[in-house]
Amino acid sequence: MRYFISISIIFLCLVLLTQNSSAQKGKDKSGAVSIGVVEVETIVKELPEAVSADKLLKELGQKYKDTLMQIQQEYQQKIEAYDKQKSMMSADQQKKEQDALKAIEQRFGQYQEEKFGMQGEIAQRRDKFLEPIRAKVKAAIEAVAKEESLNYVFDKGSSALLYAEEKSDITYRVLDKIKRGSGK
């Protein structure tokens, strides 16, 4: 966390230095840099569509957890039955029961990954629900930043840069300097 904060502070200083050097070259006569901060989490919590999406995701997650619990109970019951009858089973029957138990384990893991994994259904639905909310918040941040003449807007919760004026983007100037071999 400290590393991230340090990087954010360094980035902010670089942005301010870049802005000040532009001002000294006459590109920005005022020389003032305006920075705004916003708590995106607070904003999102107040949006009805975000609250609704959160509720739907929790309900869906609970449904999937219930299914996982059923699979787990089935597994426990099969284990108990197997342990009780193991001594009376032939080697072939034991192997067959062990294979059935492994199949239940695999089914549990596969279901868990399909529903709760990084590319699982919950993650996909979350992205689908959040995309229009993110776009709405981003548009509002940009509109307020322009109305308030802010050069940059950061998220208080994560120190992420949410808005920057186009004229502050020096990407192609840096690339040009590197390509010309004078990146010193």
Image (tube, rainbow, N blue to C red):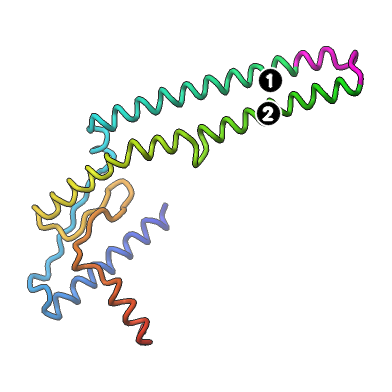
83 drawn magenta: yes
Name the kind of residue labelled 1 in the image: Tyr
**Label whose residue precedes the other's in the sequence (2 or 1):** 1
Vertical side of 55 occupied by 162: above or below: below
Determine whether the residue tagged by mark 2 lies in a helix, strand or loop. helix
- The image quadrant of residue 86 is top right
Q: What percent of the width, then of the height, locates residue 26?
A: 11, 79
Q: Residues within 10 Å of mark 1 (few under 14, many from 20)?
A: some
Which residue bears the numbered disc 1? Answer: 75
User: In the image, is 117 to the left or to the right of 52?
Assistant: right
Name the kind of residue labelled 2 in the image: Glu
Q: What percent of the width, then of the height, locates residue 124?
A: 43, 38
Determine whether the residue tagged by mark 1 lies in a helix, strand or loop. helix
- The image quadrant of residue 101 is top right
Q: CA distance from mark 2 to mark 1?
A: 8 Å
Mark 2 in CB contact with mark 1 (< 8 angstroms): yes
User: In the image, is 42 to the left or to the right of 76?
Assistant: left
Which residue bears the numbered disc 2? Answer: 105
Q: Which stretch appears magenta?
A: 80-90
> Residue at position x 80%, y 16% from top?
82
Badge count? 2
Vertical side of 176 occupied by 51: above or below: above
> Residue at position x 39%, y 56% from top?
4
Q: What percent of the width, then of the height, locates residue 29?
A: 8, 73
> Residue at position x 26%, y 43% from top?
40
171 drawn magenta: no
Question: Would you say the magenta stretch is mainly helix, strand or loop?
Answer: helix
Vertical side of 148 occupied by 173: above or below: below
- The image quadrant of residue 22 is bottom left
Q: What percent of the width, then of the height, locates residue 114?
A: 54, 34
